[in-house]
Image: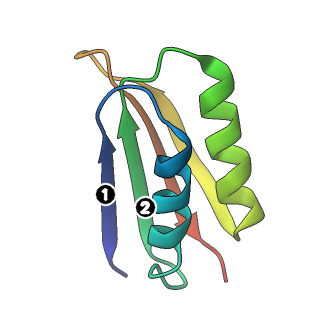
Amino acid sequence: MSEYKLDIPGDINLSDYSSIHDYMGIIERNDKFTITSKIKDPQEMKLLCKMLEDNYFTVVTQGDKENGEYYITSKRER
């Protein structure tokens, strides 16, 4: 099992979603994938979780860190 991490500085824009989708394509079954960002809008995080789930990832944890970043940790199921 490999672990991947994607850090997005600031708000997510349209090209970031494309990059996230491309990045998900290299992750294999049972690999762990963590996204961190300083997103302020909870709807953005819901959208990212939905995007992960639609691509066969299970969201394992999500929440805030002390430095103001938000994180989502997921695992690829297929």
The residue carrying pointer 1 sits among few (fewer than 14), some (14 to 19) or many (20 or more) residues within 10 Å by Cα, namely: few
**Residue under numbered circle 1:** 5
Which residue: 43% across, 61% down? 33
Q: Which residue is mark 2?
A: 33
Quarter of the figure with residue 44: top right
Q: Nearer the viewer, residue 60 or 36?
A: 36
In depth, the one of 58 and 15 nearer the eye is: 15
Question: In the image, is residue 14 above or below residue 66?
Answer: below
- Which amino acid type is shown beneath numbered disc 2? Phe
10 Å neighbourhood of mark 2: few (<14), some, or many (≥20)?
many
Rendering coords of residue 2 (x, y %): 33, 78
Question: Residue extending furthest left?
Answer: 67
Residue at 62 percent across and 43 percent down: it is 48
Numbered marks: total: 2
Left or right position of 52 against 75: right
Q: Name the residue: 29% across, 33% down.
A: 9
* Distance of label 2 from label 1 (alpha carbons): 6 Å
| Quarter of the image where one finds residue 32 | bottom left
- Display colour scheme: rainbow
Q: Are marks 2 and 1 in contact (CB under 8 Å)?
A: yes
Residue 14 image position (x, y, % from top left) = 56, 44
Instruction: Please indicate whether residue 1 sits to the left or right of residue 51 in the image.
Output: left
Tell me the amino acid under the disc marked 1. Answer: Lys
Which tag, 2 or 1, sits closer to the chain's start?
1
Looking at the figure, which quarter contains the N terminus?
bottom left
Residue occupying the point 51% across, 79% down: 30
Q: Position of residue 58 (x, y in %)?
A: 65, 59
Image height check: is 52 above or below 45? below
SS label for mark 1 = strand
